[in-house]
Image (cartoon, helix red, strand yellow):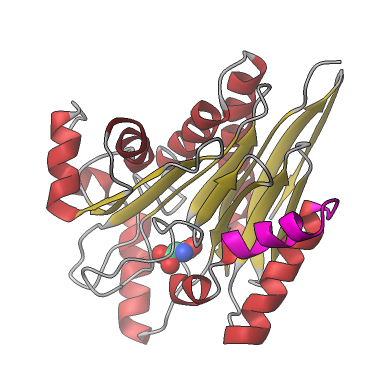
Amino acid sequence: MKPPVSIIVHGGAGKIPDKAVEDYINGTGIAAQKGFKLLKQGKSAVEAVEEAVRSMEEFPPLNCGVGSSLNRQRHIEMDAFLMRGNDLKSGAVAGVARILHPVSLAKRVMEDTPYLLIAGKGAEELAREFGFELLDENELITEDALRRWERVRKKMERQVSDTVGAVALDRYGNCASALSTGGMTYKLPGRIGDTPLVGCGGYANDIVGAAAATGIGEDLMKVVISKTALDHMKRRKDLHPKKAAQLAIDYLEERVNGREGGIIVMDMKGRVGWAFNAPRMGYAFIRRVGSRTFRGGGV
Ligand code: ASP
């Protein structure tokens, strides 16, 4: 029997308005499809999660790449992360503005530097060295992001802004996790959320599985949510990822009153789970077990 391959992605958790539901279904559905195609071709989980996140970075309705949220000074500061489960090496960037695919820069940090996290100007300099196209920041700013910014500025409310994430298992038995975000709308310049921090935004460990979270970064960081979800599975060998995801969200709520979180989780059989206590979260998954393929998703 062929080994299982599996991918689950999320497009962020929060107050997703009715009129945006279709965008979330399309954005996450296409991303899962693109990642799954690579897994079927025998590509690695790392390549699959990168591809899935790249597809969402190119999709303006989601808060990453083009369409990223704006900070208080009306500038873009994106964070991204990628981690492989075989040796626990990860790469991340924080506060970058001028590239379309921060997740690919995070992958280069993982693969081609001894570091785990590079921020700001240093990350942009690295992007230049690696040959990434450096854009004018305005090319990444959309009308929608500007409207979001105006709304939050007027109300001064804290708003969750829909990070995207993906986790995958490949046919070689390796898993990976990736994330990309513009962060919270109207955040203080220099603020870095959970997304690029190991174990908070995401985690991948081939002896357990992988996870990727979304929500108010300051709450997610306090409970190291992705690692927390996977630790449940490490302790209880056959715990379903769905249960682990729910336990992590319950803990977020009980321990730090975190109310707008979401998480996707996968085990090394390719079983997937998700949970959220935000009003909505967009997600999509595709799994192949033997000759059968299972698909699902929702908002
Ligand atoms: N977790 C992200 C952050 O705090 C935002 C989100 O998931 O929507 O930067």
Query: In this view of the protein, which residue sits in the foreground, 267 or 294?
Result: 267
Position of 144 relative to 293 (above/below): below
Query: In this view of the protein, which residue sits in the foreground, 42 or 114?
Result: 114
Q: Quadrant of ligand 1?
A: bottom left
Q: Quadrant of the C terminus?
A: bottom right
Coordinates of residue 282 in the picture (x, y in percent): 63, 53
Query: In this view of the protein, which residue sits in the foreground, 86 or 189?
Result: 86
Coordinates of residue 125 in the picture (x, y in percent): 12, 41
Number of numbered labels in the structure image: 0
Q: Residue at x 86, y 51 (%)?
A: 238
Q: Say which quarter of the image contains residue 28.
A: top right
Coordinates of residue 94 in the picture (x, y in percent): 28, 55
Q: Quadrant of the N terminus?
A: top right
Query: In this view of the protein, which residue sits in the foreground, 198 or 23?
Result: 198
Q: Residue at x 18, y 26 (%)?
A: 131
The main secondary structure of the magenta stretch is helix
Coordinates of residue 6 in the picture (x, y in percent): 71, 32
Work out whether residue 257 can be spotted: no
28 left or right of 274 in image: left
289 left or right of 215 in image: right
Magenta-span inclusion, residue 237: yes
Q: Residue at x 17, y 70 (%)?
A: 73
Position of 15 relative to 231 (above/below): below
Position of 127 relative to 298 (above/below): above
Work out whether residue 117 can be spotted: yes
Q: Which residues are magenta?
A: 226-240
Q: Say which quarter of the image contains residue 181.
A: bottom left
